[in-house]
Amino acid sequence: MWLSRKLTQHEKQNTASAETGAVTIDSGEVAVFSSGEDRDVRIAAPGGFFWRPISGEKVLVIKGGTFAEEPFIVGAVQEDEALPAGEIRIAPAKGGAEILLHNDGRVDINGELFINGMPYIPLLM
């Protein structure tokens, strides 16, 4: 009875939270330091999209579960990016390659392009 009452009181409090943190371990298990260090943090992303943050990257951590014991990284904190509203840039944290989707329908691919494992070499006319 006492435990049931305590759980009920705790559930009335909003224990789920969101906070920013920095990735401290990026190989094997992922760890994030925010209000303390959480280890073996799972990464949540839109279906079909897979991403792994790098050590030192600033991320948004959502803590869910009955006692906010389940941390999830749900995204990276964006730095000031000079990107027009509505446009999309896909790029790794350390740079190198990128895909830009512009509002006018143009798609820019920067970096080396491989198709089915083979480098793409455009035909010169």
Image (cartoon, rainbow, N blue to C red):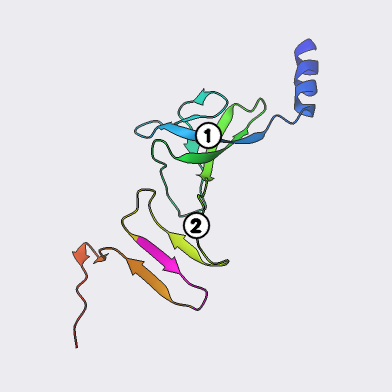
Residue 47 in picture, x, y percent from top left: 50, 53
Q: Which mark is residue 12?
A: none
Between the residue at mark 1 and the residue at mark 2, the CA separation in whole angstroms equals 20 Å
Residue 49 in picture, x, y percent from top left: 45, 53
Residue 4 in picture, x, y percent from top left: 77, 17
- As drawn, 37 above or below 3: below
At horizontal 19% and vertical 73% (from top left) the residue drawn is 121
Q: Amino acid at mark 2?
A: Glu
> Which tag, 1 or 2, sits closer to the chain's start?
1
Assess disc 1: are there few (<14), some (14-19) or many (≥20) residues with their C-alpha within 10 Å of its C-alpha: many
Question: Is residue 102 highlighted in magenta?
Answer: yes
Q: Which residue is the extreme one toward the bottom?
A: 125
- As drawn, 60 above or below 80: above
Q: Is residue 110 left or right of residue 34?
A: left
Question: Is residue 94 highlighted in magenta?
Answer: no
Q: Is residue 30 visible?
A: no
Look at the image and tell me in which quarter the C terminus lies.
bottom left
Q: Is residue 59 left or right of residue 7?
A: left
Q: Amino acid at mark 1?
A: Gly
Q: Is residue 47 left or right of residue 5?
A: left
The span picked out in magenta is 98-104
Q: Which residue is mark 2?
A: 81
Locate residue 63: give its quadrant.
top right
Q: Which residue is mark 1?
A: 21
Look at the image and tell me in which quarter the N terminus lies.
top right
- SS category of the residue bearing label 2: loop
Assess disc 2: are there few (<14), some (14-19) or many (≥20) residues with their C-alpha within 10 Å of its C-alpha: few
At horizontal 46% and vertical 55% (from top left) the residue drawn is 48
